[in-house]
Image (cartoon, helix red, strand yellow):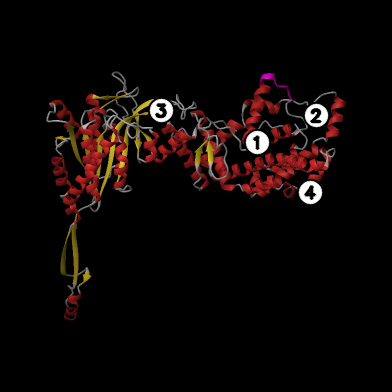
Amino acid sequence: MQKFKNNSSSFWLDDEVNYDVLTGDLIKPGKDYVKMAATKRAIGNFVSIVTGKSIPVTYSTKDESYTDGEQIVISSNIKDKDFDPTVGLALHEGSHCLLTNFEVLKYLMRNPLQAIPATLQDTIKNKYFSHLEESETEWMVTNYITNHVKSLLNYVEDRRIDSFVYRSAPGYQGYYQAMYNKYFNAKVVDKGLQSSELRDLDWKSYMFRIINLTNINRDMDALPGLKAIWKLLDLKNIDKVKDTQEALDMAFKIFEIVESNLPSNDEAKKEEEKEGNTGKGGKNKKGNELPQSQKGQLKKAIQKQMDHNDGDVKKKTLSKSDKKKVQAIQDSGSELVSVGDGLPKNYMTAGTGTKCLVVKNLNMALAESNIYSTFTSQKRYYGVESNQAAIDKGIKLGTMLGRKLQIRNDSNSLTYNRLRKGVLDKRMVASLGYGNEQVFNQIFTDQFSPGFIHISVDASGSMSGDKWLTSQTSAVAIAKAASMVQNLNVVISYRSVEQVGSEELPAIFIAYDSRKDKISKIIKMFKYLDCPGTTPEGLCFEAIQNEIIDGNNGVDSYFINFSDGEPYFESGKISYWGPKAYSHTKKQIDSMRSRGIKILSYFISSGNYTSDSNTKNFKTMYGNDAESIDVTKLNQLTKSLNKKFATK
């Protein structure tokens, strides 16, 4: 089988492979929860597409280390090179959830006397356990049979479900091939199959040879009965095994073939005495003996295969608290978006840009996880009390503003009658007898178009204090006012910087969206927002271009910016400041304008002083109609907004 190196996932994983998709170490600063959530989400999507079922995917904890038929458990230690095999394993386990009847195995293990044919029980009893007391025999016989048949059932069922999915979802074959390469196609296994190892007449040798029947290095003469098992399985037509019960029936048949070639205790003892060795007789001497070092490697490889066959693949565990963090990030819709391609990496070199963290849905679990410094329930210098007071003020102000915006709810209707088409005017029916054909009317209603407002607030450190609190009040006021008006939706986002794994990245948090959120979300959660970052400006705007509705097709679309400084962000991948940053931010704003979005940009100052250079650079980015306002004078802002939104 051809070996792959993440060929299947390379189309969506990062181009850079010099770091892990997930960190395998214990939790410590720099653990990349965002990528862990993205990986979990991606694998869940693959499983859902292939199986057609919504099967939960979860990271392994001490209490969850195997797939139970209802959920899929993955390791918390997925590195780049392990991603494709992990997807393949998840698809394999998802296929079990879809196609395997777990009750068949449960019945075998719980009711062996009823599930195992009586004749087979007698055969095994006479062969191995006739010397035991009757009270011991029953348990020994059924335990011996069920343990081996269970492994054989797992093997047959694995081949059945893998064949089904492999053929029905050809686009995912690469992931399955990667899984088989990892667990079944190790070089030491190839050598082991060709060597003199594991050719004894015992279950260990037979299971090794049976599990590796899919390997091109298989030796059908290594043990008696292998050809009969190969013919019975007929792997090219394994789909003839329709369900788990039929797989169990085949497992019993394979068990009987193997047992027919194994010596009884007495026969084995005589063979040992005859050959003068300590192992079981019947060893086929074909093949070279492996070096001692490779024997150890083969032992480990066989254990890995048996673990896979028994559904007991060892998976790195994740603490329950960190599992909650990953889930909170996944529920928040956190994702990384590529931005800033071509912007300077440093003074001398053009770069390939950076990633921007986009968080699409704030929730309490995310705040309480304290993963992000921009949205956290941890105690801060100003505390949540000051934030809450600003929010409460915004709700009151928004209620007053909403009353002034009620004009958007009004509509004017004008009726035109004596028309040749439209709605029949009952008052004109009588005139039909006189040849009058103008007996219809039409009503024309003049009303406001649907409105969409995206408010983006600078959450850089320089915004702290009165500028932050009054900007919060203004944003909340607009959201509250819009909630009182028909067809006027508001989205509020916050631009900041976050540590994601080992990297510092631009970040933008979509904190409120009136299309799906209620005002109660603002009252409950906005107090946990803070301004700890620098000023990534256009990098964040680029990341959310698709989140802002075009001002076309009858929609009045506005983008409102609150900021108090010039763009600045630096990392090992990008140097974002000065003319290049101004130009990049202007490009994003111009892109919005070209889509019919009206731009309202306010330079937030804490007093009357604003330097000429700041004003010039601000207008370069946002246009000559950008304003510089004192945020302590909210009436000015209210009048400006009211004038924009209450007019057609």
Q: Which residue is mark 3?
A: 501
Q: Is residue 278 above or below residue 357?
A: above
Report the amino acid beneath label 2: Lys
- Quadrant in which the N terminus appears: top right
Report the amino acid beneath label 3: Gly
Horizontally, residue 444 falls left or right of residue 296, namely left
Distance Cα–Cα, label 3 vs label 2 = 55 Å
Q: Which residue is mark 1?
A: 214
Q: Secondary structure at mark 1?
A: loop
Given the current orientation, which residue lies at the most extreme bottom position?
A: 433
Q: Are marks 3 and 2 in contact (CB under 8 Å)?
A: no
Q: Secondary structure at mark 4?
A: helix
Q: Which residues are magenta?
A: 287-293
Horizontally, residue 294 falls left or right of residue 441, namely right
Mark 2 or mark 4, whichever is nearer to me: 4
- Classified by dominant secondary structure, the portion drawn in magenta counts as loop
Query: Looking at the picture, how far across and down is residue 214, in whole percent?
Result: 65, 36
Query: Looking at the picture, how far across and down is residue 638, in whole percent?
Result: 16, 43
Distance Cα–Cα, label 4 vs label 1 = 33 Å
Mark 2 or mark 1, whichever is nearer to me: 2
Distance Cα–Cα, label 3 vs label 1 = 40 Å
Mark 4 or mark 1: which comes first in sequence?
Answer: 4
